[in-house]
Amino acid sequence: EAYQLPVNGYCYMFDAANSQDYIANSHNKGETNKTPVGVASSGLQSVLPLLLITDYLCSTTKNATNRGHDVSSLLVNSNPFIYKDDNDLICYLGTGGKMEIVDLLNGMMTHASCFINIVEEPEQNLFPLTQRSVLRHLIRVCNALNNNRLILSTHSPYIIADLVAAMRVDGLLRRIDQYDKYKTVGQVRELAHKCYPQEATINAGDVCLYETSYNGTVSRANDGQVISDSNFLNRHLALSNMLFQEIDSLEEMAEGLGIFREL
């Protein structure tokens, strides 16, 4: 069964016959092309484990919440770093040594009520549009259970800008719901959903931003308020735009002086 990636129509497939992982797409005139994950683009190699693990852990948590069963055997069968040793103890091999985690797994997965997803720099090797798609997927997963949490570290202004958009659309929809007696409200709501998927929106009151300065200090942005358009990364993006405007003015000045014609 194919796992659909929120990235340009790509999906992940596992061929059990030859134990090969593939990235598949149907961009070429409707024909499905399969590329081994090992030779796929660095962006797909980066984002695939993030999305697979995120969706799997969220699904596992929901199953544990709904049915209260022991899912440790599922993890053993599906994760190459988790195994049972000769004494039938569940262990993790990923920290340079063996670590018994049977109690941790059983306690976490049989009584879990939420999924706390900690993601470091999801923008790695991704185009800006793909960064937005990945963020929206992570927010959807966060919204899947009431107590879920998403903790992100990022250097990307595109991630921050899209997070601001998610909060602004949520605020707009909340205000619309208060005035649904007007006929035009339905049109605005429909346009808002097209602008930003509702399932990926997030309440501004549930979001906070911490910035790291050049000297290493960490502070909460905007004096404890929620994220605004004027944040550290966006300010630096604005500096680039100002630089381009200055260069445009210089080029216009040079052109007015006839410098380009003399070259």
Image (cartoon, rainbow, N blue to C red):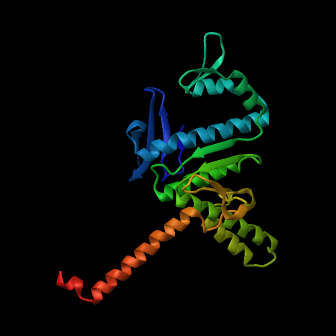
Asked if residue 178 is positioned above or below residue 257 in the image, the reply reads above
Residue drawn at x 65%, y 10% is 87
- The answer to whether 179 is drawn above or below residue 49 in the figure is below
**Vertical position of residue 29 compared to residue 74: above or below:** below
Q: Is residue 225 visible?
A: no
**Split into 4 quadrants, where in the image is the N terminus?**
top right
Q: Residue at x 59, y 38 (%)?
A: 53
In the rendered image, is residue 77 in sight?
Answer: yes
Please tell me which residue is depicted at 61% across the width and 10% down the height of the picture.
Answer: 86
Is 79 situated left or right of 21 in this image?
Answer: right
Question: In the image, residue 122 lies at what x, y percent?
Answer: 54, 49
Is 247 situated left or right of 13 in this image? left
Identity of the residue furthest to the top in this view: 86
- Asked whether, in this view, residue 67 is left or right of residue 11, the answer is right
Quadrant location of residue 65? top right
Eyeballing the image, is 118 above or below 130?
Answer: above
x and y percentages locating residue 246 in the rendered image: 40, 78
The location of residue 105, given as percent across then percent down, is 70, 27
Q: Quadrant of residue 85?
A: top right
Identify the residue at the far left of this view: 262
Quadrant of the frame with the C terminus: bottom left
Give 3 or 221, whichever is nearer the viewer.
Answer: 221
The image quarter in which residue 54 lies: top right
